[in-house]
Image (cartoon, rainbow, N blue to C red):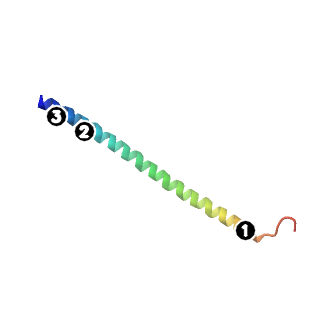
Amino acid sequence: MMQDKLKVLETHLAHVDRTLEELSDVVNKQQAQINQLTRLVELMANREEQEVDVASERPPPHW
């Protein structure tokens, strides 16, 4: 009886442990994607800022 309960708890713990590892992998992958997207947004923002600076130095088209 006690051994059966222990076996059930051990099995449950093994499933919880596996699920935790899977979730940890997902979180790590998502963090890597977030980091990559953050760098991309920063690059795009810098490029846009440079284009605005260049455009402000040019005379308007009607000149």
Q: Earlier in the sequence, mark 2 or mark 3?
A: 3
Asked which secondary structure carries label 3, the reply is helix
What residue is rendered at 24% in x and 39% in y?
13
Residue 14: x %, y % from top left: 25, 38
- Looking at the image, is mark 2 or mark 1 nearer the viewer? 2
**Quarter of the figure that contains the N terminus:** top left
Report if the CB atoms under discs 2 and 3 are less than 8 Å apart. no
Describe residue 10's horizontal placement relative to residue 45 as left or right: left
Residue 63 position by quadrant: bottom right
Percent across and percent down for residue 43 are 59, 61
Q: Please give the label number shown on residue 54.
A: 1
Q: Is residue 4 above or below residue 50?
A: above
Q: Residues within 10 Å of mark 1 (few under 14, many from 20)?
A: few
Q: Residues within 10 Å of mark 2 (few under 14, many from 20)?
A: few
In the picture, the disc for residue 13 is 2
Give the mark nearer the N terminus: 2 vs 1.
Answer: 2
Gap between marks 2 and 1, in whole Å?
61 Å
Three-letter code for the amino acid on which mark 2 is drawn: Leu
Q: Is residue 57 above or below residue 29?
A: below
**Tag 1 secondary structure:** helix
C-beta proximity under 8 Å, tags 2 and 1: no
Q: Is residue 28 above or below residue 54?
A: above
Looking at the picture, which amino acid does disc 1 mark?
Answer: Val
- Which residue occupies the extreme right position in the image? 63
Question: What residue is at 84 percent from the left and 64 percent from the top?
Answer: 61
- Judging from the image, what secondary structure is the residue with disc 2 in? helix
The residue to which callout 3 is attached is 6
Real-space Cα distance between discs 2 and 3? 10 Å
Which of the numbered marks, if any, corresponds to residue 9? none
